[in-house]
Amino acid sequence: MSIELDKEVRAIAVKSIERYFLEELEEKIGNIRAAALLSFFLEEIGPSVYNKAVADVQERLMARVNEVDVECHEEEFDFWRKRSRQGKK
């Protein structure tokens, strides 16, 4: 599965890469080279970031699923216990 960015997001990312090179490395990089670098990172490193995000979401969802039993549990056949606590015969 390749990671694709929306056209607008991709353009913003390319501009950010160009700015980073200029301001942090004091090197001008054109938008074609910046776009190529972005494509490389998306293909090479993107899956690792994606997989980590999926694993984090799975962990959080499993924690929530495990809480459902506690949050939604109802005592069964509780009528007589409740009645005896209320002092009724």
Image: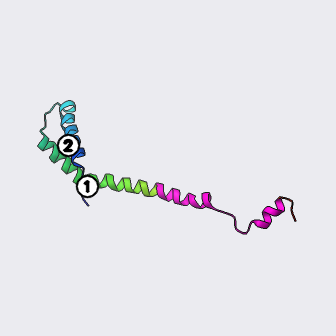
Drawn side of residue 78 relative to residue 21, left or right: right
The residue under label 2 is 11
Q: Which image quadrant is residue 19 in?
A: top left
Q: Position of residue 86 (x, y in %)?
A: 83, 58
Circle 1 Cα neighbour tier, 10 Å, few/some/many (<14 / 14–19 / ≥20):
few
Question: Tag 2 or tag 1, which sits nearer the N-term?
Answer: 1
Q: Position of residue 17 (x, y in %)?
A: 21, 39
Q: Amino acid at mark 1?
A: Ile
Q: Amino acid at mark 2?
A: Ala
Position above or below: 52 against 15: below
**Residue at position x 16%, y 42% in the image:** 34
**Residue at position x 69%, y 64% in the image:** 75
Q: CA distance from mark 1 to mark 2?
A: 15 Å
**Residue at position x 55%, y 60% in the image:** 66
In this view, the residue in front, 52 or 82, is 82
Q: Residue furthest front?
A: 88
Q: Which mark is residue 3?
A: 1
Q: What range of the chain is rendered magenta?
A: 60-85
User: How many marks can you see?
Assistant: 2
- SS of the residue at dot 1? loop
- Based on the picture, tell me whether residue 32 belongs to the magenta stretch: no
In this view, the residue in front, 64 or 8, is 8
Q: Position of residue 62 (x, y in %)?
A: 49, 59
Quadrant showing the N terminus: bottom left
Q: Residue furthest bottom?
A: 77
Position above or below: 76 against 2: below
Drawn side of residue 54 relative to residue 88, left or right: left
Drawn side of residue 61 relative to residue 51, left or right: right
